[in-house]
Amino acid sequence: MKIFGYFLLLLLIFTSCSSYSEHEKEAFDTKIQLHLDTLNISMQRMEHGLYYRILDEGNGGRKIRFNDRVTFSYRGSFLNGNVFQTIHPQDPITFHVRELIAGWQDGLMLLKEGGEIELIIPPHLAYGKKKTELIPANSIVKYQLKVHDVK
């Protein structure tokens, strides 16, 4: 499963950031806002459409940077709550931030080592119009990421 996770992440690096119209981006944003309203959850929104909630900023000396190598675990799900992948804390993965999808990059750079964050990522910051074995095309995805180490 860990090898599949690595493969999926590398595949996503090359398929993310597909071009979307402003109308499509607004439609994704509306779905996310409706989801948050339904669950009565409050999250911050970045200008480009990433939603986040910092659960723990972390205790490292500085925030994570674009060229850092980060070891982390996560749970990925869809807005309907269906979990599509879990990387457990006892078996985390390691990547340079720059190798990850845009939504993860932005979310991780809000944290320090030991930090934890919830993200809701629209397709244009995630996997785009490409489908994978786990994620359909144009999917809005949710992640809870926990940073274990930063180098």
Image: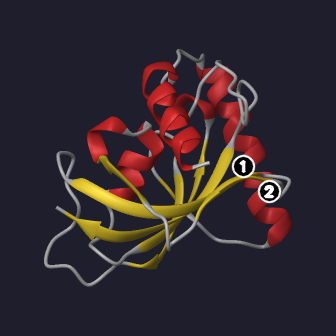
- Residue drawn at x 70%, y 22% as measured from the top left: 131
Amino acid at circle 1: Ile
Give the image quarter of residue 4: top right
Location of the C terminus (image quadrant):
bottom left
Up-down: is 144 above or below 79? below
Up-down: is 46 above or below 111? above
- Residue drawn at x 51%, y 29% as measured from the top left: 12
Tell me the number on the disc at residue 35.
2
Q: Disc 1 designates what residue?
A: 32
> x%, y% of residue 86?
64, 59
Q: Nearer the viewer, residue 12 or 31?
A: 12
Figure colour scheme: secondary structure
* Crowding near the residue tagged with mark 2, few <14, some 14–19, many ≥20 C-alpha atoms within 10 Å: some
* Crowding near the residue tagged with mark 1, few <14, some 14–19, many ≥20 C-alpha atoms within 10 Å: many
Callout 2: SS: helix
Q: Nearer the viewer, residue 40 or 10?
A: 10
Q: Is residue 66 left or right of residue 40?
A: left
Q: Is residue 15 left or right of residue 22?
A: left
Q: Is residue 62 left or right of residue 11?
A: left
Q: CA distance from mark 2 to mark 1?
A: 5 Å
Amino acid at circle 2: His
Q: Nearer the viewer, residue 82 or 17?
A: 82
Callout 1: SS: helix
> x%, y% of residue 114?
34, 78
- Residue drawn at x 83%, y 54% as measured from the top left: 82
Give the image quarter of residue 5: top right
> x%, y% of residue 44?
52, 63
- Check whether the beta carbons of the residues at disc 2 and disc 1 lie within 8 A of each other: yes
